[in-house]
Amino acid sequence: MRGRHRFAGWLSHPGRPALSIPDGSAEPGERGSVPSEKRDQASATRDQVAEQRDDAEDQRNHVAQQRDDAEDQRDQGSVQRDKADDHRNRVADERDQAGEQRDQTADDRDQVAEQRDQAGDERDQAGDERDQAAERRDQAGDDRDTIARQRDVASAARDQTGDERDRAGERRDQAADKRDRAAENAEASASAVISRAALNRSALSRQEAAADRSRASQDRGAGASERTEAESDRITALADRGAAASERTEAELDRNAALADRGASAKDRERSSHDGLTGTYLRGPGSVGLDREIAKARRTQQPLTLAFVDVDGLKAINDSRGHAAGDRVLLGVANALRAMLRSHDLIIRYGGDEFACVIAGLNAADATKRLDLVNAALAAAAESASVTVGVAELQPNDSIEDLLAKADAALYRERPEPRRTSP
């Protein structure tokens, strides 16, 4: 019945050719001449045509359904691609933000290092000034010692002069004594005539002897004063030398402090360029190194490969086993990369759970062979982990942005399922 109704509808559809179907009407005189077998055959033909049309309609509906399903799948794929693009954009923003924070930290550490270097320079200058002051004090001590020696010589000369004057005074006293005895003898003799001139000479000799003794006493006093001043000069010179030694000690302390400041500034600079946990380069200094390696590869016409290494499931490790375990996994990945790569290959902590490896002199295939060993090493480690790697080889016209984008795209191709980020 379904086929007959469809056949009837097809007959009534405008624009379709009408079938010539005998309806039993004929000219008078021919009404009973059409056999019943022909009518049955025509009816069977109509039913067959209707069923064929139904089958064709079902096939068209099936094709339409397949087209709708394909369209739905394309729409679903487009939605997934949009979600993946959104995820990549979020991850890129997070990476940029983390890179900016690390760059700011590096700038702060560089500033601290510069301040320490400046403090070291100031301490070195203070040490030089103290050394100069010590030299001046030593010179002053030497000058005072020289003056003390000169005073000692002058004192000795005055003492010698005093001794000579004392001897001259004694001689004059002896001569005066002789004259006095002669005068006394003359006075004892009644017949002797005392010469006034002899008496005057005796008195004059005694006065000269007294003057000689006075001058000798003054000379000895001056010599004692000279010796006292010489001793004071020696004491002052000793104090100057002690002060000079103290200045030199302080200068040495200043230089040691300056050396410590420079060592601390060197450590600050290292911390400003290296990640504190893994010891790898931070994103900012690492990007400078990548730019330098690209220029070198083009200059030497050697291959250069950039690999993005993503730690699998780090968020889940942090959530389930704690951030200390996550830190151990990150350190293990960094150590595995250092072990499998060469000492001059750059390893950069590019994001929270991602490293960038700059492998100079190797093409993508050779670099991949080395990086494949990382997962084997991580599987055997105490803190088991795994990584996903995306590799891109530098092409002649690639900029640093092009190379980074290609390596990032390769990483996402290796990880088809976009990971969920924390809300």
Image (tube, helix red, strand yellow):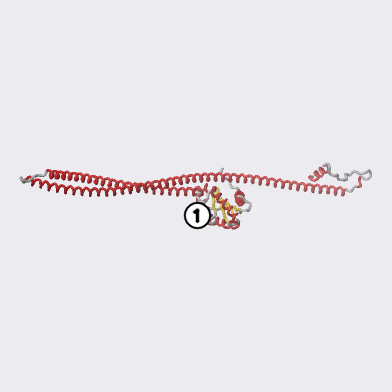
Q: Nearer the viewer, residue 205 or 84?
A: 205
Q: Is residue 184 left or right of residue 230?
A: left
- Residue 404 placed where, x, y %? 60, 50
Q: Is residue 409 left or right of residue 203?
A: right
- Residue 397 placed where, x, y %? 63, 51
Identify which amino acid the numbered label 1 is placed on. Answer: Ala
Q: Which residue is mark 1?
A: 382
Q: Nearer the viewer, residue 288 or 329?
A: 288
Examine the image and state in which quarter residue 225 appears. top left
Circle 1 crowding by C-alpha within 10 Å: few under 14, some 14–19, many from 20: few
Confirm whether residue 408 shows in the render: no
- Residue 415 placed where, x, y %? 60, 51
Quadrant (top left/top right/bottom left/bottom right) for the C terminus = top right
Q: Is residue 405 left or right of residue 114?
A: right
Image label count: 1
SS of the residue at dot 1?
A: loop
Name the residue located 52 percent from the left edge and 51 percent from the top edge: 280
Confirm whether residue 129 shows in the render: yes
Quadrant (top left/top right/bottom left/bottom right) for the N terminus = top right
- Residue 227 placed where, x, y %? 26, 47
Q: Nearer the viewer, residue 186 or 357?
A: 186
Furthest residue in direction left, as rendered: 190
Q: Nearer the viewer, residue 411 or 299?
A: 299
Name the residue located 76 percent from the left edge and 47 percent from the top edge: 60
